[in-house]
Amino acid sequence: MSGVPQNASKGAAQKTFYLETFGCQMNVHDSEKVVGTLVQEGYRQVETVEHADLVLYNTCSIRDKAEQKVFNRLSDYKKYKAQGKTFGVLGCVAQQEGEKIFERAPYVSLVCGSASYRKLPEMLHQLEDAQLQNSPQSPAIGSIDSNPSNTAKGGAPAPVVVTAAKTRDSGLAARDSLVRITGLDDRETDACFETEFTARTNPHRGYITIIEGCDKFCAYCVVPYTRGKERSRTSASVLAEARQMADLGYTEIQLLGQNVNSYKDSEGNPSKRKTFAELLAAVGEVPGIRRVRFMTSHPRDFGRDIVEAIDAVPALCDHVHLPVQSGSTRMLGAMQRLYTREQYLERIAWMKAAKREISITTDVIVGFPGETESDFAETLGLLEEVGYDAVFAFKYSPRPNTPSLKLEDAIPDAEKARRLDVLMARQREIQSTRYKRYIGTRCEVMVEARNDARGQYIGRTSHNKTLNFTAPQSENPKSGSYAPVVVTGSFPNSLLGELVV
Ligand code: 5AD
Ligand code: SF4
């Protein structure tokens, strides 16, 4: 990650860390908080594992494949442990697997869920101290636990040193002395919102988490178990952060939450509480903010007022990501999605009736237990009916703790793969047609970067489409600036254009 602020005060012996992030935007933003916290602690971020003292993986467990990635990484890096590097697993796999990670990846010293990131400095200090004390003569695994029963004032548990237990892995014991620390505190804390130090990686566009966790318990999903109960931030603190970002020169804000539109203002004074649509509008009216996005919306909680807010406030981007998961009401029931195909389509109809054209994108799962050819055909039909601008499709992956784990995962992987291919091919055709309609129109883009190899600039439209464009040599649109571009060509996933001068 480049462009990360570094705390230069610590001199030559400065500790270094490498952080790799997997998964969703919530994780990306959590990583920004981790980076900010560590830099404040005097660490310097480096680009490679080789150069780091501390190696951190911020993990995702939404599908098995995502979870495997981190264990592959950790098995790759055994040799680095011999060089004295410390390995830590953060995020959803940490929360889901807990101390089991130490068994699967014995080189790991730190396991920390997202609700405990504010505790990272303290945990790292304890880890360092314990590592110093833990001599090679006593090959022990010291376990330091951030124990929920040991909750400090303010609800955040304090890490405490528990016991030092001999490892059963004699190879490991002979080879190494490991000290281990876990931060897996209660996942209901609001502490995750108010992080003092956030190293935002983009100086123009930034995230604000407004709601954490999820209470929906869709049958296939680990999120309620890894991210905990749904809890919202106060609208006052969201708006304060938005104003602060605007003062720093940010012009685009993305409001984040697993179900961002399930937001319930936790403001103490009921008369000051805002609905999600009101909060959206208020952020869109912060002076200096030109674009507001929000991700991800749940169809059950998607009210007409959100569309009305988009109509009323120009800064609200005309893009809504509304995961459908399946086009079959029968499957939606089995998935415990809390809406029918018809109710979903009603929300689509509200968006299609908006004054501005709203670009709609979605997520789909194929091969959920019991999905028949006819259920799948209903999903294909829904793609046609809605006309999505992007679809993120996944093969069903059974996950620990979830209700659907009890259902037989009877659809063979090859059949899931076939359905995925059919769906993506169909969507590609739909997108090709949809993207062509923009040719000849004029769009405002936020300039993201210059692609020197292609002699193009990369822009993003309010619809959230990538619009690559050329500009005369006399012009040099800067990253973060807004520019008018006329669309001259289209591909299934992007547009091509020329700067209007
Ligand atoms: N298997 C496959 N896809 C899943 N998703 C969530 N859980 C699973 C699972 N167990 C998908 C959903 C969700 C997206 C973020 O990931 O489509 O919207
Ligand atoms: Fe997972 Fe469903 Fe919650 Fe989304 S709404 S995070 S899919 S449980």
Image (cartoon, helix red, strand yellow):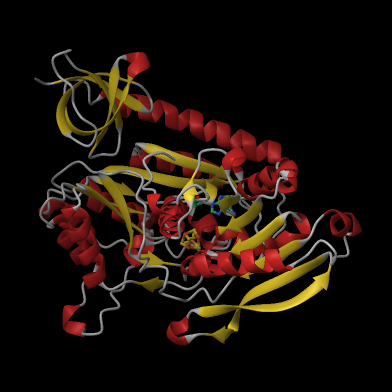
In the image, what residue occupies the spot 58% across and 45% down?
A: 52
Does 267 sit above or below residue 179? below
In the image, what residue occupies the spot 64% across and 68% down?
A: 129
In the image, what residue occupies the spot 34% across and 36% down?
A: 389
Q: Which residue is more in the foreground, 96 or 77?
A: 77
Where residue 164 sits: x, y (%)?
78, 74
The quadrant in which residue 383 appears is top left
Does 348 sit above or below residue 441? below
The quadrant in which residue 483 appears is top left
Q: Visible in this render: residue 227?
A: no
Where residue 45 sits: x, y (%)?
48, 46
* Residue that sits furthest to the top in the current view: 473
The quadrant in which residue 262 appears is bottom left
Q: Visible in this render: residue 420?
A: yes
Q: Is residue 354 left or right of residue 72?
A: left
Q: Is residue 191 left or right of residue 487?
A: right
Q: Which residue is more in the foreground, 91 or 428?
A: 91
Q: Quadrant of the C terminus?
A: top left
Q: Which residue is more in the foreground, 139 or 438?
A: 139
